[in-house]
Amino acid sequence: MMLIMAIIAMILALICYSVGVWGEKIAGKLTKKNLAFFWIGFVFDTAGTTMMSIISESFKFDIHGITGALAIVLMLFHAIWATIVLVKNNEKLMVKFHKFSLGVWTIWLFSFLTGMILNIK
């Protein structure tokens, strides 16, 4: 049951984080709606990762483990930085923010895909 919950959490993370990042890219500007999706995606990713860690009982020092750890740290930094940018209401940063977002999303997506590929049984 925990595996099913973890998979659902990771898929919801993929959907939410992608909506936030690509919504920002398409709009050409960071918005509160994007920020909400970043945080929701981060929460689902953290929940899914935690459940997967409990199931596997260890951290694997492989490409997925390394990129996954990097991705979750970057997602947290990304969401915090987006929050700061919106609170400061810095128009210049709000417009340029998507460049960083796409990089973080790409690393996260790579980790998501390697986790799927390496763990399909």
Image (tube, helix red, strand yellow):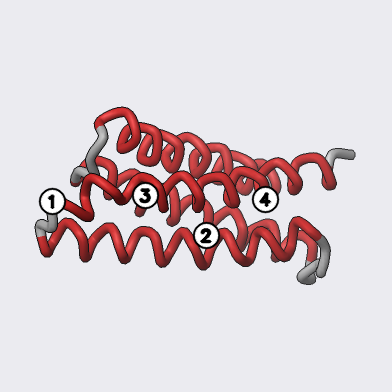
Question: Where is residue 100 drawn, in percent x and y?
Answer: 41, 53
| Rendered position, 81 above or below 39 | below
* Distance between mark 4 and mark 1 Cα atoms: 31 Å
* Distance between mark 1 and mark 2 Cα atoms: 30 Å
Residue type indicated by callout 2:
Thr
Please name the residue shown 52% across and 39% down the image.
14
| Closer to the eye: label 4 or 1 | 1
The quadrant of the picture occupied by the C terminus is top right
| Rendered position, 57 above or below 89 | below
* Distance between mark 3 and mark 2 Cα atoms: 12 Å
Neighbor class of circle 1 (other Cα within 10 Å; few <14, some 14-19, many 20+) is few
Q: Counting residues from the N terminus, which is met first, the one under dot 4 or under dot 1? A: 1
**Residue behind mark 4:** 111
Q: Which quadrant would residue 28 be assigned to in this image?
A: top left
**Residue behind mark 2:** 46
Q: Counting residues from the N terminus, which is met first, the one under dot 3 or under dot 4? A: 3
**Residue behind mark 3:** 38
- Circle 3 — which element? helix
- Circle 2 — which element? helix
* Distance between mark 3 and mark 4 Cα atoms: 17 Å
**Residue behind mark 1:** 91
Please name the residue shown 72% across and 65% down the image.
66
Q: Which quadrant would residue 42 be assigned to in this image?
A: bottom left
- Circle 1 — which element? helix
**Residues tagged 1 and 3 counted as in contact (Cβ below 8 A):** no
Q: In the displayed structure, does residue 69 sit left or right of residue 88? A: right
Residue type indicated by callout 4:
Ser
Q: Counting residues from the N terminus, which is met first, the one under dot 1 or under dot 2? A: 2
Neighbor class of circle 4 (other Cα within 10 Å; few <14, some 14-19, many 20+) is many
Q: Counting residues from the N terminus, which is met first, the one under dot 3 or under dot 2? A: 3
Please name the residue shown 31% across and 37% down the image.
24
